[in-house]
Image: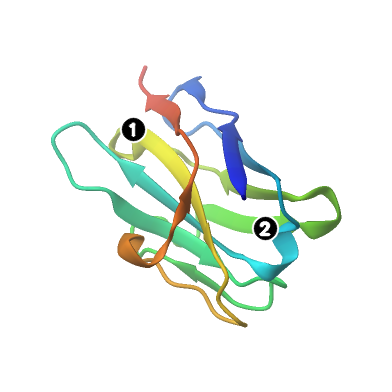
Amino acid sequence: QLQLVESGGGLVQPGGSLRLSCAASGSTLDIYAIGWFRQAPGKEREGVSCISSRGGRTTYADSVKGRFTISRDNANNTAYLQMNSLKPEDTAIYYCAAESFQAMCFMTRRVYNYWGQGTQVTVSS
């Protein structure tokens, strides 16, 4: 059974950077696409970015394009979300999710069956 654990969240000033990690255990990660999602207070969980199982395809929400970069290291069973130029509106709990898609990924939360517990990101001065 695949298990995911996020880390790397915290408090950062506007314009700052954070790198989130999503560590997998229980199964090899290289057969799973990874999605990053976030949920702000009072809002629905939304897709931020996703990456296919071998890293050949990535997708970003318009709100984070040019600022966030998704990557993965299958040898270490870990995926990452590098977040630069952070804004207060990026404040949310960030979740990683996994599903065994082939050579594609989706930013639709209902298609993912494996989820981490989330990590809080707060952007504030």
Image vertical order of residue 114 relative to residue 90, above or below: below
On screen, residue 53 versus residue 49, left or right, reads right
Give percent across and percent down for residue 106.
43, 72
Disc ID at residue 102: none
On screen, residue 90 versus residue 25, left or right, reads left
Total marks in image: 2
| Of the image marks 2 and 1, the number of the one nearer the N terminus | 2
Separation of residues labelled 2 and 1 (CA atoms): 21 Å
Q: At x 46% / y 33%, what residue is drawn?
A: 117
Report the amino acid beneath label 1: Thr
Quadrant hosting residue 124:
top left
The quarter of the picture where the C terminus appears is: top left
Give percent across and percent down for residue 122.
39, 24
Q: At x 42% / y 39%, what residue is drawn?
A: 94
> Which of the pair 65/60 is nearer the observer?
60
Task: Label 2, secondary structure: give it.
Answer: strand
Q: What is the crowding at mark 1: few (fewer than 14 residues within 10 Å), some, or many (at least 20)? A: many
Quadrant hosting residue 107:
bottom left
The residue pinned by badge 2 equals: 71
> Which of the pair 13/113 is nearer the observer?
113
- Farthest left residue in view: 42
Report the amino acid beneath label 2: Ser
Give percent across and percent down for residue 102.
60, 82
Render colour scheme: rainbow
Give percent across and percent down for residue 118.
45, 34
The residue pinned by badge 1 equals: 91
Task: Label 1, secondary structure: give it.
Answer: loop
Image vertical order of residue 46 relative to residue 83, above or below: below
Image vertical order of residue 26 relative to residue 48, above or below: above
Q: At x 42% / y 61%, what residue is drawn?
A: 112
